[in-house]
Amino acid sequence: MIIGGVAASVLGRPRLTQDVDALAVLPEADWADAIRLASQYQILPRVEDALQFAKRSRVLLMRHTTSGIDVDVTFGELPFERAAVANCENHEVGGVRVRLPRVE
């Protein structure tokens, strides 16, 4: 689910943001696979030993190499994070379907 400035711009008032923030509920055992999958879309780790950094901080620091845009993925574990992801909604943004938080 996309969060942060991009989500705020789509769901509320547009604002300047220089990165993409996401919240993912994914077992730690699958994080390495997520990094490999992201690389197929030119999204690569932007810190050395990104997996170990994520295990310490629950944040995966990535960069879309084609555009240079940073992508920060927070791995949610708390009940409210899990609920937010479970209840998010699909939105069409620039011809791309993205999952955003439900506005309540």
Image (spheres, helix red, strand yellow):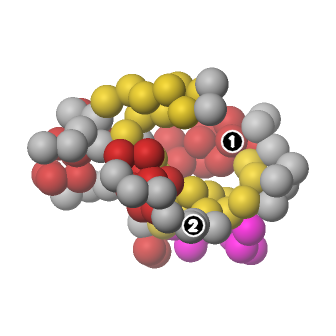
Magenta stretch: includes residue 52 = yes
Compare marks 1 and 2 and give the one earlier in the sequence: 2
Could you tell me which quadrant the N terminus lies in?
top left
Where is residue 64 drawn, in percent x and y? 76, 53
Where is residue 94 drawn, in percent x and y? 62, 32
Look at mark 2 in the image and give the residue it sits on.
17
Is residue 51 found left or right of 92 in the rendered image? right
Q: Which residue is drawn at 74% across and 68% down?
A: 46
Secondary structure of the residue carrying tag 1 is helix
Please name the amino acid that badge 2 sits on.
Thr
Residue interval drawn in magenta: 46-54
Q: Which residue is more in the foreground, 18 or 10?
A: 10
Where is residue 85 drawn, in percent x and y? 28, 40
Mark 2 crowd level (few <14, some 14–19, many ≥20, 10 Å Cα): few
Where is residue 51 drawn, in percent x and y? 60, 62
Say the numbered circle drawn on residue 38: 1
Can the viewer see residue 1 in this picture?
yes
